[in-house]
Every structure is written in C-alpha cells, then in structure tokens.
Amino acid sequence: MGMHDAERALFDLKQGRPLYVTAAGEPGALIATVDGLTDAALDTLRDEGPLRLAVTRHRAISMGLVPAAAVEGPRGVSLSLNGEGPEQILHLAMAKGRFSIDPRDVRPASCVEVGGLTLARLGRLLPAVVSATADPDGSPALRNAIANGAALSVTSSQVDELAGNVDVRVTQVSEGPVPLAEAEYARFVFFREAHGLLGHVAVLVGKQSDWPDPVPVRIHSACLTGDLFGSLRCDCGEQLRGSLRHFAGSGGGVLLYMGQEGRDIGLANKLRAYTLQEHGLDTVDADGVLGFGADEREYVAAVEMLKALGVARVRLLTNNPAKMEALRAGGIDVQDRRPLYGTLNRHNLPYVKAKMQRAGHWLADMLSGTPSPK
C-alpha cells in the first residue's frame, strides 16, 4: 500500500492541498508546494508553526547558498521564512539572482522536506516546498484532518519507493496503425510507466519483419513547442521528422516518443526557463535557477520499451552521448550512431551551443555551418 499512498499524496500536492510527511528519526512536517501555493494553504501551515522553504541543491547553488564548485552536497537546502506571501515565496524559489539570506537560517533539507521536493519533481511542478514542523499528537486540527482524510499522511520511504519505480508495461488497447506523411506504414504502441505518471509512444515504421539489422532507433523527448508548433528556439521538430524520413528510406525503424517535455522538467517549467533565457541565461543555467539539473531525463523506460518490442541491436540516431551510454548500460547493443541535425537560426543558436558546450552533445559539425536567416 505504501506506493499507492505516495501516488495519492502526489495527486493532493498537485491539487494544492497540504500533505503530512514523516521520516524515521525526525519530526514530521506539513508540506505544500510553492507551485500553485495559496494563502489558505499557507495559513494551514502557519497554524502548526514557523515556516521554512526547501529548494533543491541546483536552486541553492543559483541563490549562492551552496558553492557552485562543490561536487558533493545536500540534496536540498532549507531556509526560514519571515511572513512572505505566495508571490514572494514563488519569487524566492525561482527568480534569477542572489538573495540576502542570513546563513544562520540555512540548513540541509530534512528527509521530510526532501520527500516533498521529490514529489514536486515527480509531478513536474517547480521543485520547491514550504513546510511547518507538525505533530498530530499535539495538534487536534491536524489529527482530525488526517483522520477524516482532509490531509493525507505519507512517509519519505514511500515517496522514495514511488520515485524509484520505473518499470514500464505495454497498454495493449493503445496499439494501432497511424499512417504518417513521412512514413505511410506506421504503428503506434502506447507504453505507461508502472506508477502511471508518464506515458510514452513507440512509433514503429515499416513491417517489423523487414527492419534492417541493426534497427534504426531514435529516442525523442516530447517537445510541444518544437514538434507541434515549429518553434525556432530548438531543433526538435526537424529531428523528429528527419528521423521518420530516415526510417522510411532505410527499411523501417523505431521512434520512441518519450513523455519528457523540456528534458523532463515539464511544459510549465520549460516556459519559465524560456523567460529566464530572454534575460541572458542559457538553457542549462535557466534550468538551474528553477531548481533542476542540466538534464533530468533517465532512459530506463526507453530500454524497457525496446526490450518489449524485441529490439536488441540498434543504430541510434542521436547527438547525445548519454542516450548511447544508457542503452548500453541497459543491455541494448548499440552497433552504430548516426547524427541528426536541424537547421541553425538566430533563435536556436544559443540552445545548440549550450547543448554542445555544457552537455557534451556531438554538434560541432552542425555549428560549423551558417545559421539560416529565419
């Protein structure tokens, strides 16, 4: 039942309801996410005691609370609040710049606070939570709220179990033919991760019996702005359609369309990062200001999807070394790699440069060209 409690807890947090989190060896706390924080939720927490704001290590570095050069450090950082309202707390949790914070009010986040941060991250919310130490034995209001289901209680170990469960299973009813402009013979197979938080689609181009060996494969993270609307900020849409054309011209292949928008920070946070980029930050630093790492994606689900499809040897269409490493670590034989480039323009040039210089993507050949005038 533990993981199911954590799933319910995640739903409650996304609905803006405070959650009671406990951990062995430390006091429990009532927690609410900063994303969507309301005055009512803050008042509920204040009734229990002084408020604290917990942020990730990435956010703490951007705030100047943790040295950027530190290799090791706490998973999160907690600082005391002093009467701020929801908008002020949101600013403190995601605005660009350094802040005048009394170092005596800063400490490593507790296991309870880290549990809240983990749930916020799983929900693709801004990874920042407000907490108030609380004890149902000493608070009739909290005790009654837990007893009648108004407040859910969950342990940090249950949250960790939910976060660590990355199994996938095929949803058989979601398989069907979908002829595409780039590849008329194509089938879509829908996969869902066991905890139900993310869904992914495998696009099978050509008849599986006719696929070449190794099988051409593209792992493509969902990008609403680029894939659907043709955003000039990235090269995602061109990579998506280019991979489908490659499959059609080479006898078939598999596109794994992963539900990992914005390198898995979610669409809302990606748009926040775009706003920060307008003020001079590159894509990596913008994500750091919001509390995320340079790339939050994992590829265990992609490995399991390929295994479920019976694909063991692949030619990977990618510029990202992490994808090759992840497939090989998962037991997939990556026989070959093929680069996949979009078109440079003045809007996506900083993004492509950051991917090469900050994340180690193989994009030197693409950058050696001349940006298009678009």
Image (tube, rainbow, N blue to C red):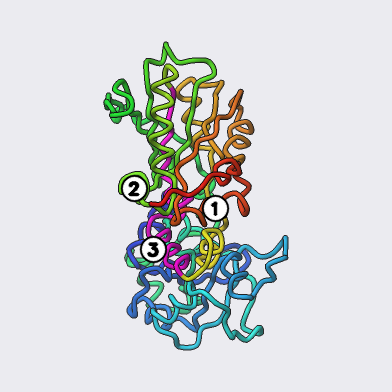
Q: Residues within 10 Å of mark 1 (few under 14, many from 20)?
A: some
Which of the two labelled residues, at mark 3 and mark 2, occupies the earlier sequence position?
3
Badge 2 element: loop
Q: CA distance from mark 1 to mark 2?
A: 37 Å
Q: Is residue 201 left or right of residue 154?
A: left
Q: Position of residue 365 (x, y in %)?
A: 58, 40
Give, as a three-letter code, the residue at label 1: Asp
* In this picture, residue 323 sits left or right of residue 227: right
The reply, left or right, for residue 186 in relation to residue 3 is left
* Residue of label 2: 230
Q: Earlier in the sequence, mark 1 or mark 2?
A: 1
The label number, if any, that marks residue 13 in the structure image:
3
The residue shown at (64%, 33%) is 329
Q: Is residue 180 above or below residue 273?
A: above
64 or 50, nearer to the observer: 64
In the image, what residue type sits under mark 2? Gly
> Quarter-wise, where is residue 259 in the image?
top left
Q: Position of residue 366 (x, y in %)?
A: 54, 42
Seen from the viewer's position, the closer of residues 362 and 153 is 362
